[in-house]
Amino acid sequence: MARLTGARPVAARRWGCATAAVFLLLLTVQAAQKADLSGDTTAATINHSLTLLQRLQELLQHGNGSDSVLRVRTAASDEAKVFHTHQLLLSLQSEVFESLLRNQSVVTLHEPPETAALFEKFIRYLYCGGVSILLHQAIPMHQLASKYRVWGLQRGVAEYMKTHLASESSQGHVVGWYHYAVRIGDAALQESCLQFLAWNLSAVLGSAEWGSVSVELLLLLLERSDLVLHSELELYTAVEGWLGRQQPEGPMAERVLRAIRYPMIAPSQLFRLQAQSAVLARHYSAVQDLLFQAFQFHAASPLHFAKYFDVNCSMFLPRNYLAPSWGSQWVINNPARDDRSTSFQTQLGPSSHDAGKRVTWNVLFSPRWLPISLRPVYSDSVSGAVQPVRIEDGRPRLVITPAMSSPDFAGVSFQKTVLVGVRQQGRVLVKHAYSFHQSSDEVADFLAHADLQKRTSEYLIDNSLHLHIIIKPVYHSLIKVKK
């Protein structure tokens, strides 16, 4: 198979086409027989499909009865990989091969090294309908599927990428997959990658993958309020390192720096950045107004500050910070057993004016809460029977309520975010994030699709449910005063 042996005799080509046609005919006959006998209780299915697949693999491996030859060349090598194939099988899977082989039996294909290395796997998929790939092979395999219009394989690889974002790799792969999705216009893959990066940003910031982030991706991430990380200072430090390595042009660097939410950084840390950050010193004029506003925010009460400044903007909206002052981690052992409760405290708000003020929160978790529509009711019949209710009819419920009220709450509401952690490929990552506001104390559809009764549930780590509850104060303008 590694060398070109010349054109095969016409009889051999006809035999190859006939063999392939027979195999396909057998499949059609089996399907028809199954449909014909579906109503007969004595019907049975005799399935030799694995044998058929083995025969098809042997056709490709030995080139028996091949009627076409594919020569795959790369610019880096003078040698060509040669594949003795069968026109009928290739044409059934790919309209591109159907067109290429219509009037010729020998075709030379030019591929870059990364796709040429996977071409044998690609051809094997055309014969057998299955292929195994690794993380670093996903993009070149998707490129082959797209180039030769093998739509089933293209969809399969795209789905593989969306379900393997959490897989561990030495250099990281999610950023590269995002950039590839942008190039090919796959909006679904783009959003999946963006969501993963946002919910697991702390892990990305400390990896080699962070250095490969494009400026466009960085700006998209900085716009988001659902980023999960320890603090805004952690984000600034990572952005500072990125700017030092990438050295973007002045206007682009200034756009990046202006996307940092400086009011979410404590004044003592802001003073340190002004004194020690070389990046901030270089672009100080571009962010001077934001730093001054941040110091004003920390100096005045939020209620007074909101009279003069618009606080209904992203600059004053916290992200999902994991620092203890913003929330608490809660590990629920054996969550399917019974109801649990806990309490914790958070800071009233990010302003230093409220540094000593705390809010206590009560949390209730129920693994099998029943909505009113499913609760048992007594019948008016003589028997007085109760409608049967199964345990599995209940669903997990999480309620978060403040344990106190205070005049300090004026002008602020609280957004609650619940992160659900899972173990994937040996790492604990955020599987899902639920957010709701003060107007609702309950998380809607909380773990609606999770089966906590099973110890093997993907939402459990060592039979425990790992939650991280974050309270985000959101300020509101109350009175407008002319400046």
Image (spheres, grey):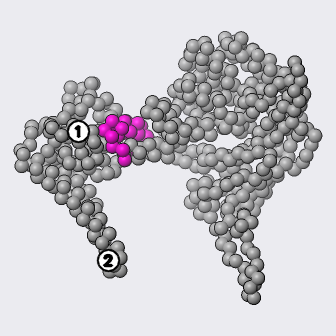
Q: Position of residue 137 (x, y in %)?
A: 39, 38
- Residue at the (68%, 77%) spot, across then down: 388
- Asked if the residue at tag 2 contacts the one at tag 1, i.e. Cβ–Cβ closer than 8 Å, the answer is no
Q: In this view, does 165 lie above or below 270?
A: below
Which of discs 1 and 2 lies nearer the camera? The answer is 1
- Residue at the (65%, 36%) spot, across then down: 227
Query: SS class of the residue under badge 2?
Result: loop
Q: Which residue lies furthest to the bottom in this view?
A: 382
Query: SS class of the residue under badge 1?
Result: helix
Q: Is residue 268 above or below residue 48?
A: above
The magenta-colored residue range is: 133-152
First in sequence, mark 1 or 2: give its number.
2
Tally the numbered discs: 2
Q: Does the magenta stretch include residue 146?
A: yes
Residue at the spot of label 2 = 43
Residue at the spot of label 1 = 99
Q: Is residue 444 above or below residue 270?
A: below
Q: In this view, does 430 lie to the left or right of 314?
A: left
Within-10-Å neighbours for mark 2: few <14, some 14–19, many 20+: few
Q: In this view, does 173 lie to the left or right of 195?
A: left
Task: Inspect this view and state whether residue 137 appears.
Answer: no
